[in-house]
């Protein structure tokens, strides 16, 4: 049996390791389009702040790790997939046949339609190559503009601030991380970043990029203002990397649609990670979750079903986004916006940069937003993922949402007792 994995990120490595764990003889091939050893994009900010070197970004640190597991890593680009003939066409290496194929191609950055966006001093910060370019230009005291204050943009923000650049962030929405937090929480994060010396411009767009000199750009804003910059970093979001999929062999919506076994619309082809549109735990809908824990979970489940040794069902991944921005921890879990007809309780302490919001559906906790607290995330995840009926503890939390751990221990212990 030959398993071909297109991609070399977290989903791909998780799948390859699972395949080898359960089969010592099957052939496993991973295709790395970037010509690099499998690495974590989430490690790039640590690279930019010199906390690690490039080797430190690798998903597995042991030398010759993949060789030791008899996993072949091919550094090439998959340009097309022929499902009928079960083969992958490579840019440099011809065709590669497979018995089972996993699409784990991840995401690619969105490219805004802005005049001048192709300037040599405009970069993404998504790949190792991007990081090298950013490190070249983002020197101390250099004026740098970051376009986008979403989840990815906020991670890059911290790395840039720690490099000592003169940083301005331009965000289209009225708050930071708008897909992760509401107005109060996003406003706290903005205020904290400004307190730390980062200029944040919300409800603002970049409309044009102009080369002013060899080393300087003029960044024209929708407000009419013009920013001076030696570097513009575009972090305006990502989309599933499905460009190599041609024709109608594989059904693609926003991402590659998969069933509860991570199987695509074509036999023997699976998908996992950022490219997969799979079941969301909270909504029950098929959605793309571009976060590393989901990718790891997807990869494991897909691999188990590629082996045909078992039918492992995906019950849905829980969205949990965690940021540590210049020392301020923030987190959103599940349906943080709440559900129609549901109850909500919040505590807002702007002077201490603290916010806590719990969202309920009947007696169940379904979502939460946390800013400035470091001891709630595990219990919140446990309550939401466990779908526990809170009973009297719902009223306890409505009166004091900080009693999360007490509620979790009480309902989890009761549930365990009932199971026994």
Image (cartoon, rainbow, N blue to C red):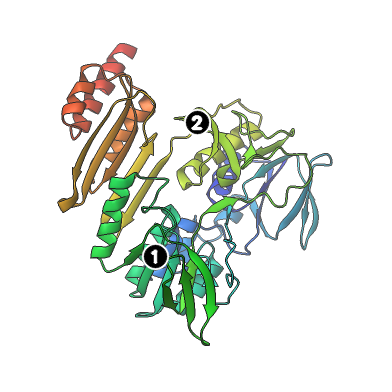
Closer to viewer: mark 2 or mark 1: 1
Residue 25 image point, x, y percent: 67, 41
Can residue 22 be seen here? The reply is no
Quarter of the picture holding the N terminus: top right
Residue under pointer 1: 169
Q: Which residue lies at the image location 34% right of the left edge and 63% below the top edge? A: 200
Q: Are marks 2 and 1 in contact (CB under 8 Å)?
A: no
Residue 264 image point, x, y percent: 68, 35
Residue under pointer 2: 316
Residue 310 image point, x, y percent: 61, 26
Can residue 358 be seen here? The reply is yes
Residue 357 placement: quadrant: top left
Q: Which residue lies at the image location 63% right of the left edge and 64% below the top edge? A: 35
Would you place residue 16 above or below residue 416 in this image? below
Looking at the image, the residue that sits furthest to the right is 85
Neighbour class for label 2 at 10 Å: few (<14), some, many (≥20)?
many
Would you place residue 236 above or below residue 375 in this image? below
Q: Which of marks 2 and 1 is nearer the N terminus?
A: 1
Which numbered tag is attached to residue 342?
none
Residue 246 image point, x, y percent: 77, 47
Q: Which residue lies at the image location 46% right of the left edge and 65% below the top edge? A: 222
Residue 103 placement: quadrant: top right
Would you place residue 3 above or below residue 263 in this image? below
Horizontally, is 405 left or right of 242 in the view?
left
| Spatial separation of the CA atoms under disc 2 and disc 1 | 34 Å
């Amino acid at each position: 049996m030959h398993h071909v994995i297109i991609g070399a990120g977290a989903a791909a490595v998780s799948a390859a390791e699972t395949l080898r764990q359960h089969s010592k003889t099957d052939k496993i091939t991973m295709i790395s389009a970037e010509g690099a050893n499998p690495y974590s994009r989430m490690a790039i900010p640590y690279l930019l702040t010199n906390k690690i070197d490039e080797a430190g970004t690798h998903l597995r640190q042991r030398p010759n790790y993949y060789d030791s597991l008899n996993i072949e890593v091919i550094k090439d680009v998959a340009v097309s997939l022929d499902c009928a003939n079960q083969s992958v066409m490579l840019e440099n290496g011809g065709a590669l046949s497979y018995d089972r194929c996993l699409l784990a191609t991840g995401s690619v950055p969105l490219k805004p339609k802005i005049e001048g966006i192709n300037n040599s001093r405009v970069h993404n910060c998504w790949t190792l190559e991007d990081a090298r370019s950013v490190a070249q230009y983002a020197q101390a005291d250099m004026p740098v503009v970051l376009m986008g204050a979403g989840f990815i943009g906020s991670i890059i923000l911290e790395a840039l601030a720690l490099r000592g650049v003169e940083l301005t962030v331009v965000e289209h929405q009225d708050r930071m991380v708008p897909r992760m937090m509401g107005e109060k929480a996003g406003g706290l994060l903005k205020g904290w970043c400004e307190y730390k010396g980062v200029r944040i411009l919300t409800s603002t767009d970049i409309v044009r990029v102009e080369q002013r000199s060899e080393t300087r750009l003029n960044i024209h804003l929708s407000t009419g203002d013009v920013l001076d910059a030696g570097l513009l970093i575009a972090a305006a979001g990502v989309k599933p990397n499905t460009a190599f999929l041609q024709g109608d062999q594989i059904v693609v919506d926003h991402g590659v649609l998969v069933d509860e076994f991570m199987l695509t619309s074509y036999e023997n082809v699976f998908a996992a990670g950022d490219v997969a549109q799979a079941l969301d735990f909270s909504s029950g809908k098929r959605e793309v979750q571009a976060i590393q824990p989901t990718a790891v979970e997807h990869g494991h489940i897909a691999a188990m079903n590629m082996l045909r040794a078992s039918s492992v069902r995906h019950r849905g991944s829980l969205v949990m986004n965690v940021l540590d921005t210049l020392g301020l921890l923030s987190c959103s879990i599940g349906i943080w916006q709440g559900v129609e007809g549901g109850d909500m309780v919040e505590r807002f302490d702007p002077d201490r940069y603290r916010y806590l919001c719990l969202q309920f559906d009947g007696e169940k906790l379904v979502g939460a937003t946390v800013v400035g607290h470091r001891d709630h995330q595990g219990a919140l995840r446990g309550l939401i993922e466990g779908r526990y009926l809170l009973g009297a503890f719902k009223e306890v939390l409505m009166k004091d949402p900080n009693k999360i751990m007490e509620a979790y221990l009480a309902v989890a212990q009761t549930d365990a007792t009932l199971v026994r």
